[in-house]
Image (cartoon, grey):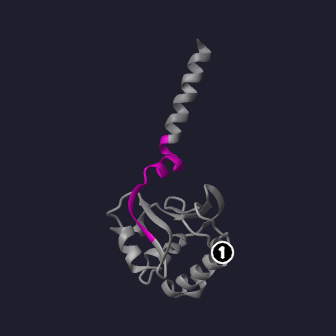
Amino acid sequence: MATAFQKLAVSTALLMGCSFSPWAQAQSLNQCGNGPLMVGQKQVGMASYFAQNCSQSWQEQTIQMDFAYTQNIPEWAFKRAATHLLKRNVKDPNIQAIFKPISDLYRPVRSGDLYRLKYTHATQTLSLSLNRKNLGQLQHPLAQQYFNIWLGPQPFSAKLKQQLLN
């Protein structure tokens, strides 16, 4: 009887712990929008935007973007685009340099691959994964600014930004 009670107590404690954990918080993200990833006239995939509250500013909460690719793309293309778009949206070179470790994590993708970029507001952590395998993370007070690539004043695509935030 004591063993059964201990198992019940441990199970309850684990369940309660999970309900307050970052993992549980991540599960509460809502899909807010999606749109095609266009390079020129060619669609290379789909982007989806998730947030705790779709009507709240992306800069004030935990957010995530998923990029599902339908075309092969070399890693240099990701790195070059990230560097260019960060320069366009984040004017301070010192802040741009903060993001180099994340941009350096990009790998080539094949059709069917999924990149996930997530910012956890509570820990100020930006993480990048490819096909659910964590490639790395960056913890910094300005880490969320990496999303300026897609959601900033001069994004990758104004039409995509509108579709994501709609």
Query: What segment is highlighted magenta in the picture?
Result: 19-36
Residue under label 1: 74
Amino acid carrying label 1: it is Pro
Based on the displayed image, in which of its 4 quarters is residue 81 positioned? bottom right
Residue 31 sits inside the magenta stretch: yes
Residue drawn 48% across the image and 84% down it: 89
Instruction: Name above or below for residue 134 compared with residue 148.
Output: above
Q: As drawn, is 24 to the left or to the right of 31?
A: right
Residue 28 location (% of width, % of height): 43, 50
Residue 48 location (% of width, % of height): 45, 63
Based on the displayed image, in which of its 4 quarters is residue 78 positioned? bottom right
Residue 116 location (% of width, % of height): 55, 62
* Nearer to the camera, 47 or 133: 47
Quadrant including the C terminus: bottom left
Residue drawn 54% across the image and 60% down it: 123
Residue 105 location (% of width, % of height): 67, 69
* Nearer to the camera, 87 or 69: 69
